Amino acid sequence: MGLADKMQEQFSKRYRLIRSLLKPLRGEWGPGICDEESFNKKHPAKPYLGELSLCILEMQDMYQQFYDNKDDKQNLRNELINIFDADDAHWHGMCSNSELLGDKELEDCEYGFQPSAVSVWEETFSDEIELNSIDSEEEFHIEMLKLMVKRVMWDVLFPGETLPGYSEPTSGDLSLLDYSIME
């Protein structure tokens, strides 16, 4: 497949399970963020996994309802390994308006992954960054999206397993991110 063909490929065609299972983390589509107190009142038997706990629960429910079989689990594992092994064009396709691999025009924040990815970034690096201090429209970076997918999907659906080829960032300092890849 040539570069031109790859750029015409839709994210949802190549990563069907990832796209489907991440729907609860997409802006207006999902249940949104929650604080620990509200979550514990509503779900006392469930662990609080951060501001996206309601989204994660919905994702887990979707997984158990539609994809909890040996083949789909292996296919999801392969999709996750493949996207973490792919170039940034695939990550841009995940959060673009068109869903075309390589398209850098981000979806509107109200419907996209940006606020959820920023939330995971802020919680992961809470010793460096204040919660709700990153502007998800202006300061979003695909490294935040990668961290979200790793923490929210891989760690939750494949607990205790190492994701090959990915190391989480060690700092949340935005000045360390290469924003030229977002242009």
Image: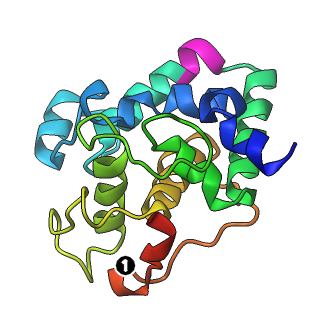
Q: Is 166 left, or right, of 129 in this rendering?
A: right
Residue 142 location, x and y as percent?
47, 61
Q: Secondary structure at mark 1?
A: loop
Q: Closest to the observer: 116 or 41?
A: 116
Q: Compared to 130, does 158 lie above or below? A: above
Q: Which residues are magenta?
A: 63-67
Quadrant in the picture for residue 119: bottom left
**Residue 65 is covered by the magenta coloring:** yes
Q: Compared to 26, does 50 lie above or below? A: below
Q: Compared to 132, does 113 lie above or below? A: above
**Residue 87 is covered by the magenta coloring:** no
User: Residue, x 85% and y 47% (percent of image)?
Assistant: 2
Residue 60 location, x and y as percent?
48, 29
Task: Tell which residue pokes out farthest to the top in this image.
Answer: 65
Q: Closest to the observer: 15 or 41?
A: 15
Please, which colouring scheme is shown? Answer: rainbow
Query: What's the residue type where badge 1 is placed?
Result: Gly
Quadrant in the picture for residue 64: top right
Q: What residue is disc 1 on?
A: 172
Quarter holding the C terminus is: bottom left
User: Residue, x 55% and y 54% (percent of image)?
Assistant: 150
Task: Tell which residue pokes out farthest to the front in this image.
Answer: 4
Q: Is 40 left, or right, of 5 in this rendering?
A: left
